[in-house]
Image (tube, grey):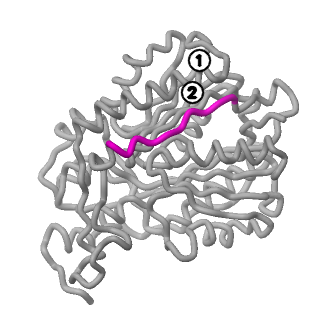
Amino acid sequence: MKSTITGWGKCVPDNVVTNDDMATFIDTSDEWIQQRTGIKERRFSHVNNSDMASVAGLRAIATAGLQPEDIDVVILATCTPDSIVPSAASHVQKKMGCVNAIVYDVNAACAGFLYAMQQAKAFIESGIYKNAVVIGSEHITWLLDWSDRNTAVLFGDGAGAMVVQESNDESEGEIYSFKNGLSSDKLAILEVPNFGSAMNRFTPYAAAETTWTFDGQEIFKNGIRAMGNASEEAIAASGLTKEDIDLLIPHQANLRIVEGLERNLKLPNAKTLKYVHKYGNTSAASIPTAFVDGIEDGSIKGGETMVITAVGAGLAWGAAAIKLGQRVTPLGETDAALPEFDGTGVDVIQESIDYFVHGKKEIQ
């Protein structure tokens, strides 16, 4: 039995925050951010992670021509869940109406979507389930210290989803192979160390005082190496060669990292999809939202062989080789959408700006 991608959807908030907007409360500039990251703008969510995840998931289900009741399993890749108990996926199941599905979270940071997709492939090809929904969704701006320009300018919020089903015909495509892993010797280069049950819960402001360990040079070097090696192994495991790859969709973390991966991986016939300038780093949502953008702007026409790859905290990494089906048009529609927000993107995080930037640290 083979598996394939039959549905796709994304949900990015309308609240656009440009680099110039960021410069109104952080010591930075549009030039400084673009030179180092390639990012021009990002989106800030005014709703919970599960709201974005649910909209993306429902759009993917509709694209596949299915109903929420048809879904057997929902896997939510996220490192910013609404809650730990119950899982964020529990909230997603309720909001999506996937009442017949088992649901659970996967946390492999930015590589989470690849981990979840490999599990969906295994579920479908083993015959355990018929219809799987994989969602990558992050409300990562909730975790940021808005006085730290080294991390605050990098991230945005969003969600993307794919439906995985059995492939019965060559024209439907096939999910060929994965190479996922984790290098814990690099754990300390990207970490939010004082968050979770390991922190001292009785320290005043413990939940608010999240700090990031972020070694940009090490992330750059190790990220390119990890994604390149994983991609080469995924291609080899599929029986393909580099010459067979038409599309490369890397994790959209930083334009310099994406371009470094291109130089290292050397896929002679592949077009690389780049959308980091629009959204910043959306962690586990990065690859599925880029995939949907590629379909919407015509970069993906159907039938291509693609490699998707990501690296994130842990150091978690992964890659997959996938043959896309010929169809790139939706089989159904949905009116699922986020509620409107009456304000600007900066207004979404004003309370956090007051706390971190203006020092208003009173507990209400």
Q: Position of residue 29 (x, y in %)?
A: 16, 44
> Residue at label 1?
245
Which residue lies at the image location 61% right of the left edge and 54% below the top edge?
Answer: 56
Q: How far apart are labels 2 and 1 at the CA level?
A: 7 Å
Label 1, residues with CA under 10 Å away: few <14, some 14-19, many ≥20:
many
> Residue at label 2?
307
Which residue lies at the image location 71% right of the left edge and 42% below the top edge?
Answer: 121
Q: Position of residue 348 (x, y in %)?
A: 35, 67
Q: Position of residue 306 (x, y in %)?
A: 60, 25
Res 21 seen here: no
Res 267 seen here: yes
Q: Amino acid at mark 1?
A: Ile
Q: Position of residue 101 (x, y in %)?
A: 76, 64
**Which quadrant of the figure contains the C terminus?**
bottom left
Q: Amino acid at mark 2?
A: Val
Q: Nearer the viewer, residue 134 or 280?
A: 134
Label 2, residues with CA under 10 Å away: few <14, some 14-19, many ≥20:
many
Main secondary structure along the magenta-highlighted residues = strand
